[in-house]
Amino acid sequence: MQTIDLHAHTTASDGSLTPTQLMVLSAEEGLTAIAVTDHDTIDGLSEATGAAAALNIELVPGIELGLDYPHGRFHLLGLLIDPQCEVLAGRLVRLKENRRQRNARMLAKMQELGLPITLEDVQRASGGGQLGRPHIALAMVGKGIVSSVAEAFALYLADGKPAHVPKDKIPPQEGIDLIHAAGGLAIMAHPNSLKLNHHDLSSDLQELRAIGLDGIECYYSQHSPARTAELLQIAAAVGLLVSGGSDFHGDPKPDIRIGQVDDGRPAPNALLYALKEAKAVVRAERKR
């Protein structure tokens, strides 16, 4: 049986495994396809593609963008994207610079709070990828300031906490358009993060579909079977594609295993097949 995971992170963003290590782990877990969806970067895709080919695993090129939204956290997955897209690459350069400035401001706040965390500490904790809050948290753990990444966020780094600086986010329409420009499908990640009830989520999804949203991550490592069934019903009613992923990060989220998508199991390959079919239809329509 072919099994997949369409949401995973590497050291290119905030995961603890390199792209090669992620491919090796995926092979060991028996996955036949894995999507690398690092936050605001495609830097890990080249290495992942080579490693996946050597291990006979299908690499699904992807990305995860943080969007500006009036409630909750809206993360948008781009699946089956073209990493060579210049439009997407140009926007990611700007996001990377904004991230660098944000990190500097958070570290300055920590210095004001008397917390001895430097940029060098964070770089050592990062494993070589772009820096973010999880790496600052790991540096804090390494220095004994907190006992865990969760504690670092709870006390200092989460929204509204003393060292937090808001992230530069892009509007939903721009995020969807960027993914479409790269030939990919725009999928809402972990919809529970929006913190909406059934009615309001359905209403928002209808509006988002009207501006180009392609699908929703119904299968997710933190969803109960009942929640998955509810989201599948919403997706069908709104006319959205269905995706599924674990949101694997490694050490930053130790309770989530690669391939833990559908109530602890990998997702069926049928999901990826349907996404590919939908992409082919869209591509054909644009050529008319």
Image: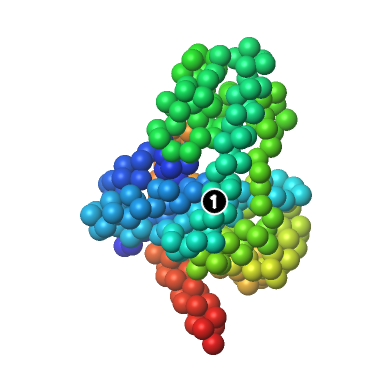
Q: Which residue matches tag 1?
A: 92
Above-or-below relation of 197 to 14: below
Which residue occupies 52% across, 46% down? 39
Q: Position of residue 251 (x, y in %)?
A: 43, 32
* Residue 158 image-quadrant placement: top right
Q: Position of residue 185 (x, y in %)?
A: 53, 65
- Mark 1, secondary structure of its residue: helix
Q: Position of residue 86 (x, y in %)?
A: 50, 61
Which residue occupies 35% across, 45% down? 19
Which residue occupies 57% across, 36% down? 100
Image quarter hosting the N terminus = bottom left
Using residue 276 as the reference point, say whether residue 172 is left or right of it.
right
Using residue 257 as the reference point, say whether residue 174 is left or right of it.
right
Q: Position of residue 279 (x, y in %)?
A: 49, 73
Q: Is residue 65 visible?
A: yes
Q: Is residue 8 visible?
A: no
Above-or-below relation of 147 to 242: above
